[in-house]
Amino acid sequence: MKTLLSALFLISFSIVSFAQVEIPATSNKPVFEGPKSNSGGLPSILLREAPRPDYKLKDDPTKPKPIEMRTKNDLLSAGDFIENKWAEDEKPEKGFGEDQYLGDFKTTGKFVELYCRDDQYVDGDKIRVRVNGVVIQNSITLGSNWTPILVTLEKGFNTIEFEALNQGSSGPNTAAFSVINEMGETINSNRWNLLTGSKASMIIVKE
């Protein structure tokens, strides 16, 4: 009987001990956590700033590069054009320091008309005109427009001289000229390129 009571006591003690074993509490926390949201309801990962390229201000690709108008694009400024024009006027022609003979021509008319103007850069070139050694125009300033000079002819040879009184402000004394007879026909057209004191001459023969 004593043995039976001991067995019952052990069985009862085992049942009570088993009932007192704690069952671990379960958590309502989800296994996978998504990205946290901000007050606007968007995941914070979407609100992160985009990474910025690592460059210095001088390397900024959005900044336009300066255009080298003069050295790379072969473009000329107004200053370049003026400088080149002056350079052209200063280029001497072969024999420009000597007197020039412009040729001899014949006409039956009583007079000829001379027209002359500055042939290059208008810089104040001045000339004196003689016919058979007599001054008929003491000083003419050559411009861009034609200057008319009427020459009355004598029978036979008529020597016409153009003397350079200066060389203007750039280079030699340069001019273009034409000789027109009574009929309005051009009998000579030429140019001169003289130093101060030099002369350009021609002969008109009146028949």
Image (spheres, rainbow, N blue to C red):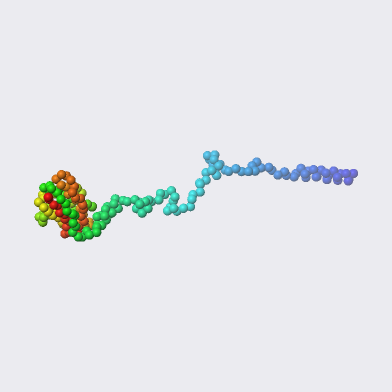
Task: Residue lying at the far top in this picture: please name it.
Answer: 41
Q: Position of residue 206 (x, y in %)?
A: 12, 50
Q: Position of residue 191 (x, y in %)?
A: 21, 53
Q: Residue at x 72, y 43 (%)?
A: 23
Residue at image position (18%, 54%) is: 103
Q: Specify the farthest residue to the right.
A: 1
Query: Height in image: 196 above or below 152?
Result: below
Res 25 → quadrant: top right
20 or 190: nearer the viewer? 190
Q: Residue at x 10, y 49 (%)?
A: 152
Q: Which one is in front, 43 or 157? A: 157
Let me know if residue 147 appears in the view: no
Instruction: Work out which residue is located at the far front of the displayed protein and give it.
Output: 207
Q: Position of residue 21 (x, y in %)?
A: 75, 45
Near-viewer residue (167 or 180): 180
Q: Please identify the quadrant where the N terminus is shown.
A: top right
- Residue 122 spot, x, y in % from top left: 21, 52
Give the tally of numbered discs.
0
Is residue 32 rendered to the left or right of residue 160? right
Residue drawn 14% across the image and 52% down it: 204
